[in-house]
Image (spheres, rainbow, N blue to C red):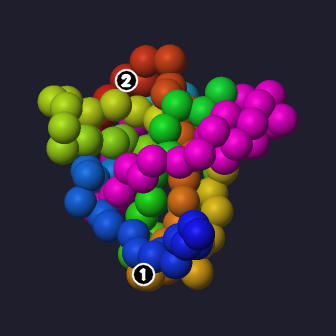
Amino acid sequence: MLKSKTDRSVAFHDGRLAILQLDPVKRITGSSAFIPCGLPTVGFKRFYEAARTEGLSADLVATVPWNMGTEVAAAELVELERNDRKGAAVYRVIQCQERRDSAPACYQLTLQHEKVKYEDLR
């Protein structure tokens, strides 16, 4: 008999991300402090179908601590540095979901790789 998965623990050791601030001309002027994040493996339905119904393409899902002191909203830009790759990439948050049933509570962010090159003034 199969057992149900009851472990809802979340780890934040796969990388770090920062929320970017833009000026009215769409240039990066600053960023928040880096926040540790996890990059969980997610199912096909969560990753692709949910985004496809919105007409968007999802590239990555990241989890960040819920009590990080900063709210993350859809349509914001984030800079992600992964521990398994060199360099950082800019992503747009296309969906932000609170997961209070996980341990610890977290935000689950669906990210889309940003193809637009922003001028970085930091």
Q: Is residue 122 left or right of residue 51?
A: left
Q: Pinpoint residue 60: horizontal percent, then vertical percent.
A: 49, 38
- Residue at point 26%, 52% (across, down): 14
Q: Determine the residue located farthest toward the front in the rendered image.
A: 1
Quarter occupied by the N terminus: bottom right
Question: What is the crowding at mark 2: few (fewer than 14 residues within 10 Å), some, or many (at least 20)?
Answer: few
Residue designated by label 1:
104
Task: Say whether disc 2 or disc 1 marks the residue closer to the N-terminus.
Answer: 1
- Residue at point 65%, 27% (across, down): 57
Q: Amino acid at mark 2?
A: Glu
Name the one closer to the observer, 85 or 7.
Answer: 7
Residue designated by label 2:
119
Q: Is residue 108 above or below residue 83?
A: below
Q: Amino acid at mark 1?
A: Pro
Q: Is residue 120 above or below residue 81?
A: above
Decide whether residue 37 is among the magenta residues. Answer: yes
Q: Residues under labels 2 and 1: Cα distance?
A: 36 Å
- Residue at point 50%, 18% (across, down): 116
Q: Pinpoint residue 4: horizontal percent, then vertical percent.
A: 58, 72
Give, as a single range, the part of the protein colored magenta. 28-56
Q: Determine the residue located farthest toward the right in the rendered image.
A: 53
Judging from the image, what secondary structure is the residue with disc 2 in?
Answer: loop
Name the one closer to the observer, 103 or 110.
Answer: 103
- Residue at point 54%, 59% (across, down): 108
Q: Locate residue 24: give its quadrant.
A: top right
